[in-house]
Amino acid sequence: MLTPIRWVDDHLELLDQRHLPEKEVWNRYDRHQDVSRAITQMVVRGAPAIGVTAGYAMALAAQNAQVDADEKTVRGNIPGWAQAQMNHLLEAAKELESSRPTAANLMWAVRRQLQVASEHLEAEDPDIAARLMEEAIVIHQEDIDHNRRLGRHGAIILEDGDRVLTYCNAGALATGGYGTALGVVRGAIEAGLNIEVFAPETRPYLQGARLTAWELIQDGIPVTLLVDGAAADLMQRGEVDAVVVGADCIAANGDVANKIGTYALALAAREHRIPFYVAAPTSTVDLTIPNGTAIPIEERDAEEITHFRGQRIAPEMARALNYAFDVTPASLVSAILTERGIIEPPSRRALKDLLTER
Ligand code: MRU
């Protein structure tokens, strides 16, 4: 199964998604600082994939912290050593969390690793790097498992012959593997349904054209590309049966942050009475964020809009606004599909119950 992230011996490797679909290039990472930069630069992208990557980055930070702490503190001074380790990990966490601020899975994975670190340091476990390494692998495996589980809802919400409009790339490349929105498509197909996918190109980074098309073609799943502006027209023509997208962050009331343009798709889907589904693992839900207005929205470099592949396409003086995500209100979402079940319609109460039930 396609995964954009792998741990090899003592280091991390990421499939450099900036080169897809032309080339498959794997980069090696030994330091969390370089992983943080790779996340910002979109070597790896998609909230769950960023979360999995951050889990490994924290393990790298612990590996390097162990060396630092051994060098800097008096051997045998366990409390001093543990404090030095923890300080180093807190620094790494801060750096990683700011690399893509909208991705809830990033904060979730970093905090999970900090929790593991603090428990083991309290117990004076000397091999904290090994513990974080084991946890990173668990986070990765869990993500794949959760995507497969939420993907099974595909057979419930979709029908044979459905034409599904997705957005950006919420596939194997955006996760530990299998995908969220594309996991739902895969789940439906594995259950025997015939499904075809419409993929808007997703300006400015072209995740739809470059990545969604690439991974669906690899799996033999029929996919048709659209320019972003064509989606509403296609709905008006009656050629879309369902919209299924992923999420970067889901607030406590069910508002959803996803790739800029998702809100417009939800509005168009409502106008044409087409169901609009959000597929995401529960690690994307942040109950500490009360609603969509409180979700931090990343603003990226204007050059992603004024330039194309290093070539200027807008006049020198043109200003550009590059919010990477927008917020779709819960009222426009037909259902949220998670590994723990379907929330239909999304509500604060239902989300809280789903996240707190054991
Ligand atoms: O800027 P990106 O490519 O990281 O944006 C990705 C998305 O918007 C995805 O839809 C979202 O992260 C969910 S991926 C399973």
Image: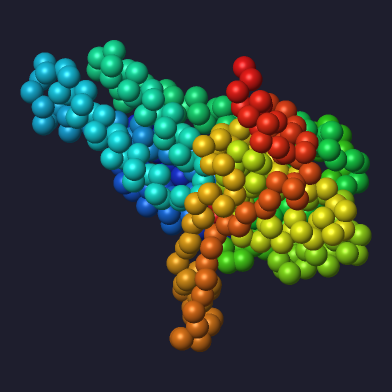
The residue lying toward the viewer, choosing from 113 and 56, is 113
Question: What colour scheme governs how the chains and residues are painted in the rendered image of this protein?
Answer: rainbow
Q: Position of residue 48 (x, y in %)?
A: 55, 40
Q: Is residue 266 above or below residue 289?
A: below
Q: Position of residue 346 (x, y in %)?
A: 72, 39
Q: Quadrant of the N terminus?
A: top right
Q: Is residue 224 left or right of residue 353?
A: right
The residue drawn where x is 46% and y is 45% is 14
How many discs mark residues in the rendered view?
0
The residue drawn where x is 87% and y is 43% is 194
Does the rendering let one see residue 147?
Answer: no
Q: Quadrant of the C terminus?
A: top right
Q: Residue furthest top?
A: 123
The residue drawn where x is 88% and y is 64% is 236
Q: Is residue 225 above or below residue 137?
A: below
Q: Position of residue 307 (x, y in %)?
A: 50, 75
Q: Residue 290 lies in what quarter of the image?
A: top right
Q: Is residue 288 left or right of residue 146?
A: left
The residue lying toward the viewer, choosing from 147 and 260, is 260
Q: Position of residue 264 (x, y in %)?
A: 71, 61
The residue lying toward the viewer, choosing from 241 and 255, is 255
Q: Is residue 77 left or right of residue 354?
A: left
Does the rendering let one see residue 296?
Answer: yes
The residue drawn where x is 75% and y is 50% is 332
Q: Is residue 168 above or below residue 106?
A: below
Q: Residue 192 lies in what quarter of the image?
A: top right
